[in-house]
Amino acid sequence: MSQRHITQVLEIAAGLSPRGLAMAENPDVVYVATDLPQILAQIKTLAEVILAKLHIQRPNLYFRVVNALDLDELLHAVSPFQSGRPIAIITEGLLSYLTRAEKETLAANIHDLLKQYGGIWITPDVGTKQSWKRIAQGDKNYVQQRIGNISGATGSDIEKNIFVDEDDMRQFFIKAGFTIEEYPHASVIDELSSIDSLNLSRETVLEVLRVPKTLILTARN
Ligand SMILES: C[S@@+](CC[C@H](N)C(=O)[O-])C[C@H]1O[C@@H](n2cnc3c(N)ncnc32)[C@H](O)[C@@H]1O
């Protein structure tokens, strides 16, 4: 976002992410954190408690109840943004909970917003059946167990929802009208302070970061 000088941020399905609190420290940033009602109430209360404890304010941080599949709610949520200035839309940890049809609705909604404001969609939600298997590295039960746990807790059929492979994932975003830039997480290894502070082996961390990536998506005409 800073590379592209984007200061208007819409986080969809923010959960308990502290990103809004951190980024809105910069008074030039306008940050809108959204989620479904129950979770949003929790993050809003948490943020208020933290801000009160630290005796600071974040007038540029907004909380809005939004179902990501509802374009009207999204359009209402972005009212603090100035038109004519680009926005960044973040979704992290959302796509694998949505069915293919729901993902298509979400992508169409985001496409609409980006057509209106310009800017980018940032998402690391590009796990595939193929990549989960690679992460499991030989432990055949691991992926199945993890998928089963998440599906059980959320009621979403994760195994059915995640992309089949890289080609399926790319085709999805291309068909939805986006241009894709891919950033492998391994490319930021030299910026990770945790390797030294936790005394980790660089090779081990590199192995963990080998598979995941983040996409920067721009809306084609
Ligand atoms: C795994 S959490 C990720 C939270 C946060 N982004 C993070 O990375 O920690 C998934 C979030 O998606 C939200 N969510 C699920 N379906 C949604 C929908 N249709 N619209 C908006 N949020 C949704 C849930 O409420 C939950 O907060």
Image (cartoon, rainbow, N blue to C red):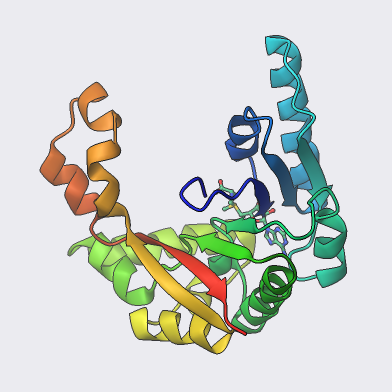
The image quadrant that residue 205 belongs to is top left
Between residues 151 and 123, which one lies in front from this camera angle?
A: 123
Between residues 9 and 41, which one lies in front from this camera angle?
A: 9
| Residue at left offset 81%, top offset 71% | 71
Residue 163 location in percent, x, y?
A: 45, 78
Residue 214 location in percent, x, y?
A: 41, 60
Between residues 163 and 86, which one lies in front from this camera angle?
A: 86
Left or right of 141 in this view: 84: right
- Using the image, determine if residue 107 lies above or below residue 49: below
- Using the image, determine if residue 20 lies above or below residue 128: above
Which residue of the protein is positioned furthest toward the front in this rendering? 84
* Total residue callouts: 0
| Residue at left offset 62%, top offset 72% | 98
Residue 55 location in percent, x, y?
A: 73, 10
The image quadrant in which ligand 1 is located: bottom right
Left or right of 95 in this view: 114: right
The image quadrant that residue 21 belongs to is top right
- Using the image, determine if residue 137 lies above or below residue 190: below
The image quadrant that residue 210 belongs to is bottom left
| Residue at left offset 19%, top offset 62% | 137
**Quadrant holding the C terminus:** bottom right
